Image: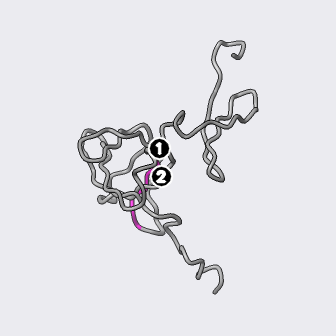
Amino acid sequence: MSESGTDLVTYDVRDGVAWARISNGKANALSFDVLGGLDRCLTLADPRAIALGSEPVRVGADAVGRVTSGGYGYTVEKSIAYAYLPSEHGVGTEVAVEIFGEWVPGVVAKEPLFDPEGERIRA
């Protein structure tokens, strides 16, 4: 614990390993179960619906996770959100994200969203 009694903890997923970085600068590996799943990219059906973070995500009627961050992807012209979801919800899974009291449909997307074959960089 820090002197104030709290530690700042941030989460990151790199190279298939989930990491928790505590305010003291040390990075500790955690299992995906501790974080609640894998960080998944979601694209939302309504480009005007922008998730900011902490919005609930459901698959069918089941709440399965929360958005960690979101915004509008100008290059792909879609609303994009990232959320930790259980590993069984892979690419193509239909989801819904609650944004300002309305459930907005979306899908777990394959990354990268822009130029997945790397053709633009080779041109």
Q: Residue at x 46, y 48 (%)?
A: 87
* Residue indicated by mark 1: 84
Q: Amino acid at mark 2?
A: Arg
According to the picture, the residue beneath numbered tag 2 turns out to be: 40
Left or right: residue 13 versus residue 97 is right
Q: Residue at x 49, y 67 (%)?
A: 113
What secondary structure is marked by label 2? strand
Query: Mark 2 or 1 closer to N-term?
Result: 2
Neighbours of disc 1 within 10 Å: few (<14), some (14-19), many (20+): some
Q: Which residue lies at the image location 54% right of the left edge and 73% below the top edge?
A: 116
Relative vertical location of residue 73 with respect to residue 67 in this rendering, above or below:
below
Q: Residue 26 falls in which quadrant of the image? A: top right
Are the residues flagged by discs 2 and 1 in contact, CB closer than 8 Å?
yes
The spot of residue 82 in percent (x, y) is 47, 49
Q: How far apart are labels 2 and 1 at the CA level?
A: 6 Å
Location of residue 2 (image quadrant)? top right
Please rate how many residues cluster around mark 2, counting C-alpha atoms within 10 Å: few if below 14, some from 14 to 19, many from 20. Answer: many
Q: Is residue 45 left or right of residue 75?
A: left
Q: Where does the image place residue 7, in percent across and percent down from the top left?
A: 65, 22
- The residue nearer to you, when weighing 11 against 50, is 11
Q: Quadrant of the N terminus?
A: top right
Asked whether 21 or 91 is in front, the reply is 91
Q: Is residue 72 magenta?
A: no
Viewer-side residue, 85 vs 119? 85
Q: Is residue 67 above or below residue 122?
A: above
Q: Amino acid at mark 1?
A: Tyr
Instruction: Please give the range of residues in magenta.
Output: 77-84
